[in-house]
Amino acid sequence: MVKHSSRIYLKQSALKSNFNFLRRKVGDDTRISSVVKANAYGHGIETFVPMAEKCGISHFSVASAFEAEEVLNACSPKSKIMIMGILYEEDIPWAIEHEIEFYVFNYDKLEKACKAAKSIGKPAHLHIEVETGANRTGMNAKEFSKTLTYLKKHKKHLVFEGLCTHFGGAESLSNQFKIDAQHKRYKEFLKECKAKKLLPKYRHIACSAAALAMKDTVYDMVRIGVAQYGFWPSPDIYYLHLQEVDKKSDGNALKRIFNWKTDIMDIRHVNAGEFIGYGTAFQATQDMRIAVMPLGYSNWLSPSLVKSRSGTHRWQESTNSGPDQYEPLHG
Ligand SMILES: *Cc1c(COP(=O)(O)O)cnc(C)c1O
């Protein structure tokens, strides 16, 4: 039985090219953590992770233990995995056992991690997240100070793997004042580490937008999500890049790795003046021969995506990797 009338393809050469581009942007001394939460932004963890490893990636970031396990099943034993989001208390021992790194954003979790590490007999690899202005997750200065003391005291069980924070909206230039303030506060936390003589292995704050456009936010590691899949985080970041390279367009800088191909269900003739499909969105202005695809909005082929071809998404379109990027949307 034929199961799937349309299929998703991921392009290894485009991914390689994206990582090469990102590598040039962040420099050789900065580790790239590939953010593969939400099933690798819909691309599929199982397929994507080995592809990224072929490009030299050996660090993956996810949002939960469940996702970490999916990466663990797909990655090479040498790769590291980091949980940036929710980690239930009952999953802490599993994470430590499998040497999965995880964020700690409150003191309570710190003590629980230590207790678990002690009883397992293996250290917990922690990324301490600090609050700098996004008010999502992260410790305040007081909690952080206590945390440093605690880390020092329990060095045997707790590894200070990273010091991190997350920007609230680095992709938009109108947020620049907020991002700058966040970065400034982050540096205060770093200062405290220096004063207490306890430094993290990795300092990391940059997501795709920051890594691409704000060089001073690039420390020992960057957490790259959307850009690796070939998308610019926003028009702002794309135009900043164009300014930097002094070009009018740079369609080959980031390439979509995602390709969606479908079989054709039927080929038919439509007379001039008739409407095609739902409503009146498309009227044939001439006699036409059309192909019908076995796909609709239930498959995420959104009508608004079809319209965006000529609309506000033009900046993104100019970064297409090939002429067939939006091809199914012509249907
Ligand atoms: C999702 C996420 C990222 C990646 O963001 P992109 O904009 O897709 O690069 C980085 N850091 C954290 C904490 C995230 O949750």
Image (cartoon, helix red, strand yellow):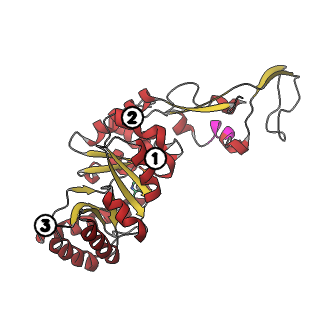
Q: Is residue 310 magenta?
A: yes
Q: Amino acid at mark 2?
A: Asn
Residue 285 or residue 27, whichever sits in front:
27
Marks 1 and 3, Cα distance to the nearest angstrom? 33 Å
Residue 330: which numbered mark, if any?
none
Marks 2 and 1, Cα distance to the nearest angstrom? 14 Å
Residue 74 x/y as whole percent: 42, 42
Residue at (75% x, 32% y) in the render: 294
Residue 233: which numbered mark, if any?
1
* Rendered view: 53 above or below 271: below
Residue 18: which numbered mark, if any?
2
The answer to whether any part of residue 136 appears in the image is: no
Q: Amino acid at mark 1?
A: Pro
Q: Where's ligand 1: which quadrant?
A: bottom left
First to last magenta residue range:
306-311
Residue 274 x/y as whole percent: 88, 29
Labels 2 & 1 near each other (Cβ < 8 A): no
Label 1 sits on a secondary structure element that is loop
Is 284 displayed left or right of 109 in the figure? right
Residue 209 or residue 1, whichever sits in front:
1
Q: State which tag comes first along the sequence, 2 or 1.
A: 2
Residue 326 or residue 43, whichever sits in front:
43
> Mark 3 sits on what residue?
194
Residue at (46% x, 30% y) in the render: 251
Q: State which tag comes first along the sequence, 2 or 3.
A: 2
The answer to whether any part of residue 69 appears in the image is: yes
Q: Is mark 1 within 8 Å of ligand 1?
A: yes
Tell me the chief SS of the magenta region. Answer: helix
Q: Quadrant of the N terminus?
A: top right
